[in-house]
Amino acid sequence: MPCGLGYRRSTIDNGMKSTKGTWRAKLGTATVLPNPLREGMRIRRTPEPCAMVIFGASGDLTARMLMPALYHLARERMLPPGFSVLGCSRSKYTDEEFRGKVRAGLKEHAKISNQDSPVLDSFLSNLYYQQVESHGAQAYGELAARLSKLDRECGTAGNRVYYVATPPSSFPVIAQELGKAGLARPENAEQKWARIVIEKPFGHDLPSARELNRVVTGVFGEQNVYRIDHYLGKETVQNLLVFRFANGIFEPIWNRRYIDHVQITVAEDLGVEGRASYFEEAGLLRDMIQSHVLQVLSLVTMEAPARFDARALRDEKTKVMRCFRPITADQAEHYTVRGQYIAGFVGGQRVEAYRSEPGVNPASVTETYAALKIYVDNWRWADVPFYIRSGKRLAKKTTEISIQFRRVPHLLFGQQGTDHIEPDLLSVQIQPDEGISLRFCAKYPGTIMQIRPVKMQFQYGESFGAEPPSAYETLLLDCMLGDNSLFTRNDSVELSWEFVDPILAHWKDAARKGLAFYEAGTWGPAEADALIERDGRRWHRL
Ligand code: NDP
């Protein structure tokens, strides 16, 4: 079977090349979308031909996230006509064996119906496999030869995305070997671009992140380095920018005059799920806060960028991150809480304590929960606390940003039942059920004045009648298009390590002493409640 996605719909016209060199596709008139809110949204972007090399192709991330995302992109006809995937890892597979493995993985993790067979077969026919150890000149010489062959046979035009989904210790080695083999920077007219996607964790602390930045950008150049944080690919996270900067009514009140405080909750009901060895080393602060949560916080607090492009957007994010007030070792006690779950019940099922999970040290002091109070020292946010909490084995899986506005300055309605009214609350639900809701006060129907909180709600699924693409779909497509707006820049990664390193240092010194325990299936330790209640506030019920 010839390479390329032969099932591409003929209604797509691939004729427009933008000034940035990315291809845009136009949907023709044959597609009629039923939802009027989607009218006028027919411009699609399609990348230039390219080969995607996945290091770590036999691993969990590839099976659960990358292949389903690529398959869904193929099904949506978003991949270029000249496209192939070359899977690489140390295990030995033939192309056919690899396709069989991916097929089995897609059946488990992707949405496939019986009618999808032609798409699936076509997608699988574009997958290839090459055995590669992370180091060794010979392996990379063979890789170069294989890629040239794919260019000839599949029309991938010498463009490359290298997706590094191996254990972190291999990240720098793979980048260096690609450089040595001449695969990192296009050297001839035939080869156009080469980009590298680096999975998290990007470093273990500030010095290791700096060193990884030095190595990877030294080989590829910062412009071609895509540090992936899948949270930034989520639809609602992107919608935060639209919400803030495409609406006139919210931005004027998005500041210390009107906002009392902000809460960000990233809760998981799962435990470490077979990733104990990684998690024991990393802990919750590194795994969730250093990466996802600080990025989300920067989107909530940043100023409006001058333009909607990667540079302007990332400049603003970095600028506000420089304003995150450092939590020094002597303040850590007051501004942070770390916890670890003990046995409990999640979703009606009894679950073991973290220390009893397979692969976890029975005396482990690794945190599975963290709560922080952060200040952003600038004119917009001075004195507004940002309460952050994230943990494993909590009551339910949810990610939410809650913006609580100040109380009214004077309460007019003094009768019984109206002397304590809830302040307005804007909630941005990132997962699940992506949407935004605004809680405000209304009069309860009746002859007496009673005030109750009510909600106005927007939900993605209901309003647009379409499921948003997965974060990995968005990010893989962006990378192929050369748009790194939603990827983390080197300075931003280093700033987030600068922020968390002193906390980690304090926690390490305090060792066992500061660890608070919480029952699995609850909302975290009592100490986290105390952190916010000291300020006369409380965590929102989610
Ligand atoms: P796995 O252990 O499941 O897979 C690791 C992959 O890397 C395997 O394909 C393995 O194959 C390959 N590999 C290991 N060592 C080498 C080596 N020296 N040279 C070449 N290939 C090697 O890990 P995951 O898929 O879970 O994670 C991969 C990366 O993605 C990690 O950095 C992780 O932190 C990150 N990540 C994973 C997430 C997930 O949900 N799984 C979520 C977020 C990030 P073989 O043994 O055949 O070489």
Image: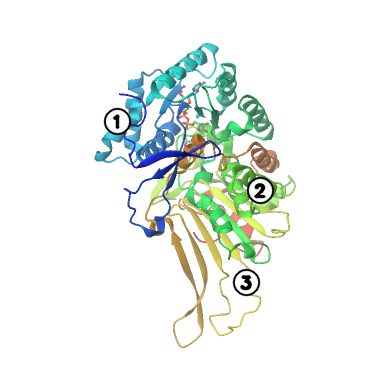
Quarter of the image for residue 486 reads top right
Ligand 1 lies under 8 Å from the Cβ of mark 1: no
Q: Secondary structure at mark 3?
A: loop
Quarter of the image for residue 411 reads bottom right
Q: Nearer the viewer, mark 2 or mark 3?
A: 2
Please give the name of the residue rendered at 58% of the width and 31% of the height, measured from the top-left corner: 224
Q: Secondary structure at mark 1?
A: helix
User: What's the amino acid at mark 2?
Assistant: Glu
User: What's the amino acid at mark 3?
Assistant: Arg
The residue beneath circle 2 is 316
Please give the name of the residue rendered at 36% of the width and 20% of the height, measured from the top-left corner: 95
In the image: residue 314, left or right of residue 467: right
Cβ–Cβ below 8 Å for labels 1 and 2? no
Alpha carbon of mark 1 to alpha carbon of mark 2: how far?
A: 44 Å
Q: Is residue 333 above or below residue 151?
A: below
In the image: residue 54, left or right of residue 295: left
Coordinates of residue 75 in the picture (x, y in percent): 35, 39
Coordinates of residue 452 in the picture (x, y in percent): 50, 75
Please give the name of the residue rendered at 60% of the width and 24% of the height, measured from the top-left corner: 172
Coordinates of residue 10 in the picture (x, y in percent): 33, 39
Q: Nearer the viewer, residue 114 or 274?
A: 114
Residue 514 seen in the current view: no
Residue 183 seen in the current view: yes
Coordinates of residue 206 in the picture (x, y in percent): 68, 35
The residue beneath circle 3 is 407
Q: Nearer the viewer, residue 27 or 16?
A: 16
The residue beneath circle 1 is 121
N-terminal of the pair, mark 2 or mark 3, is: 2
Density class for disc 3 (Cα within 10 Å; few <14, some 14-19, many ≥20) is some
